[in-house]
Image: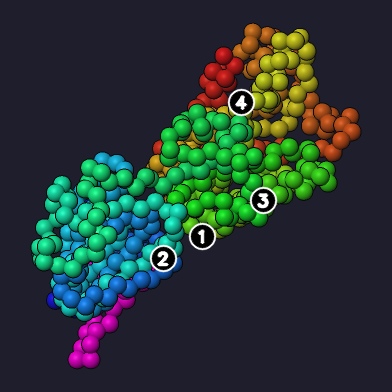
Amino acid sequence: MTEFGKALTVTETAIPGLLIADLPVHGDSRGWFKENWQREKMIAAGLPDFGPVQNNISFNDAIGTTRGIHAEPWDKWVSVATGRIFGAWVDLREGPSFGTVFTAELDPSRAIFVPRGVGNSYQTLEADTAYVYLVNDHWSADAEYSFLNLADETAAVKWPIPLAEVEISAKDLAHPRLADVTPIPPKKTLVVGANGQLGRALRHLLGDSAEYEYAGRDELDLTHPSFPLSRRWRDYETIINAAAYTAVDAAETPEGRADAWAANVTGVAALAKVAAANGITLVHVSSDYVFDGTKNGAYSEDDPLCPLGVYGQTKAAGDVAVSTVPRHYIIRTSWVIGEGNNFVRTMASLAERGIDPKVVDDQFGRLTFTSDIAAGVEHLLKTRPEYGVYNLTGAGEPMTWAQIAESVFTATGHDAARVTGVSTEAYFSAATAPVAPRPKNSVLDTDKIGATGFAPSPIMDSLTAYLA
């Protein structure tokens, strides 16, 4: 019987993510009223902000009507409008909780949140029962479903009314036993820009299991009109954007400017829109170039954006787009070194070939190796600290490019005195092509990500290992 006047409370069950809720129901001689889903109050009570897009009602005439056990690739908020049901939920997701069973009675004063992949079933205990459920995706023939027989001996649900005595559809009677069930796989992580230096580092760290999907520019063009329809996005938990236009000088040309805005803004905005619409966590890698480099001291995550050149402007605009996604991590980094051509490899090559370089000595920052960025991404996704911006660079004292070049020469057995420091202005004085303005100070404060428990590698240790 419906219980009136109780407080809103949320309780965990034996199935991870399956949450049962007691709902306040207010009644008098005229009937009763309840808030079936009140986002603000229910999130505060501990329910997830699952973003329902559809509301369904199943009306059942007779006592004993039995339906299920169905597991779908979306979340449900299940309640009863009238009547009473006995519900049985079985975890049909891949993982250690596969096959776990939870049962409970629901009436208008009690509801349950059913996460993606948990099998849902019920048996009506009163006539004229209306079973209501909100879902956060639309039905699709392409979605992956899983089913379990109501009479499965392993789950051994203790139905109040024997199954032989109740109304069940022929389809539900034909569902497989637990040993033959195809489990619902976990949501996937998509790495965009998988062929770049950060993309390759992420693949090396995360591996090639079915949980991870990697796409380069050839497989996935974020700027193409078909991009929003290129995937069934509700099957993805996370998108990691490792793609970017990074040719800072070429971005100052008319063609480069268009390419930079397309990749760093238009494509990122498309990603942000898809992520926001589908409850996806978006991880985006940003740059020290969003600042002008005039600050006296390290830049924090809260410092206002103030980019100098086209590249920095596009990265700043991309950051703004990503910040609109409810679940986002913006990783701001500097002086990235990974596989492929880069400053460290260039200096090592010059040292080996006997060339004595002139290197800028009035820009300060820290090297950041892609292995550290990849590890930082994994750390944030595992620990799930507050969403927002996190600075991430290598650990250690800031250096100039000239000091880094000297370190490369020393580490490769050459005389560091062969490196000559020059000002940025002198270095580019003879340039005939457009040159992007560089921030003089690229030092980022990494205390915020450090407070989450992440410790990047010391720069010199990473440099030595990289050169070896």
* Numbered tag placed on residue 118 in the rendering: none
What is the three-letter code of the residue carrying label 4?
Glu
Q: Mark 4 points at which residue?
A: 339
Image: magenta residue range = 22-41
Figure coloring: rainbow
Which type of secondary structure does the marked residue at label 4 adopt? loop
Return the disc, 3 or 1, that comes first in the chain's sequence.
3
Q: Earlier in the sequence, mark 4 or mark 1?
A: 1
Reading the image, the residue beneath label 2 is 52
Sequence-earlier tag: 2 or 4: 2
Mark nearer the N terminus (1 vs 2): 2
| Badge number at residue 277 | 1
Question: Residue 225: where, in percent of width, then height?
Answer: 66, 55
- Amino acid type of disc 2? Pro
Q: Is residue 231 left or right of residue 128?
A: right
For marks 4 and 1, give the CA distance. 34 Å
Q: Are marks 4 and 1 in contact (CB under 8 Å)?
A: no
Q: Dot 2, how many residues are within 10 Å of its Cα: few (below 14), some (14-19), or many (20+)? A: some
Instruction: Tell me residue 90's x, y (percent).
Output: 23, 53
Q: Mark 2 near mark 3, Cβ–Cβ under 8 Å?
A: no
- The answer to which of marks 4 and 3 sits earlier in the sequence is 3
Image quadrant where one finds the C terminus: top right
Say what secondary structure mark 1 lies in.
helix
CA gap between label 2 and label 3 equals: 28 Å
Q: What residue does disc 3 label?
A: 223
461 vs 18, nearest the viewer: 18
Which quarter of the image is occupied by the N terminus? bottom left
Would you place residue 86 above or below residue 417 in this image? below
Q: Does the magenta stretch include residue 23?
A: yes
Residue 400 located within the stretch drawn in magenta: no
